[in-house]
Image (tube, grey):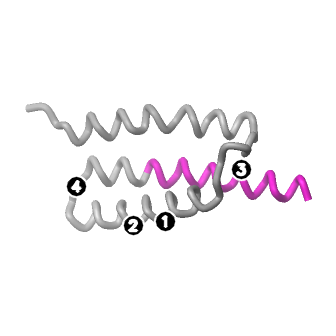
Amino acid sequence: MINFGWIGALLLLAAWLPETVTTFKSKNLDALNPKFIVFSLIGSVLLALHSYRIQDMAFLFLNTTIAVLVAVELTVYFYKLKTTV
């Protein structure tokens, strides 16, 4: 049986991962909105906790991985702010 949850999780990560890698390599934050980054991080962490609670491993994997990717973007954002000041 096809597990649409895992397929969807992998497709979303396939879309998100290149953006994070590009941001990390270029350290170009012109397109990043700090509110978006913070809300994405908080939302992903909360959804990961919810996924754990209901034992949905596809969504737990997705939201945990996205939280890590967003944390990388947030780290790059603060690093860039620190070096430009």
Name the residue beneath numbered marker 3: 76
Report the disc number at residue 56: 4
Q: Position of residue 23 (x, y in %)?
A: 67, 39
Q: Is residue 68 magenta?
A: yes
Q: Quadrant of residue 47?
A: bottom left
Question: What is the residue that sits farthest to the left in this orientation?
Answer: 1
Q: Main secondary structure of the magenta part?
A: helix
Q: Position of residue 59 (x, y in %)?
A: 29, 51
Q: Earlier in the sequence, mark 4 or mark 1?
A: 1
- Which kind of residue does numbered mark 2 sit on? Leu
Q: Residues within 10 Å of mark 2 (few under 14, many from 20)?
A: some
Q: CA distance from mark 2 to mark 1?
A: 6 Å
Eye-nearest disc, 3 or 4: 3
Mark positioned earlier in the residue sequence (2 or 4): 2
- What element does badge 4 sit on? loop
Q: Earlier in the sequence, mark 3 or mark 2?
A: 2
Which residue lies under the disc numbered 1? 42
Residue found 49% across the figure and 65% down from its top: 42
Badge 1 amino acid? Ile
Question: Would residue 73 appear left or right of 63 to someone viewing this image?
Answer: right
Q: Position of residue 55 (x, y in %)?
A: 21, 60
Which residues, given as a range, are shown in magenta? Answer: 65-85
Left or right: 71 with respect to 54? right
- Amino acid residing under circle 3: Val
Quadrant into which the C terminus falls: bottom right
Disc 3 crowd rating (10 Å Cα; few below 14, some 14-19, many 20+) is many
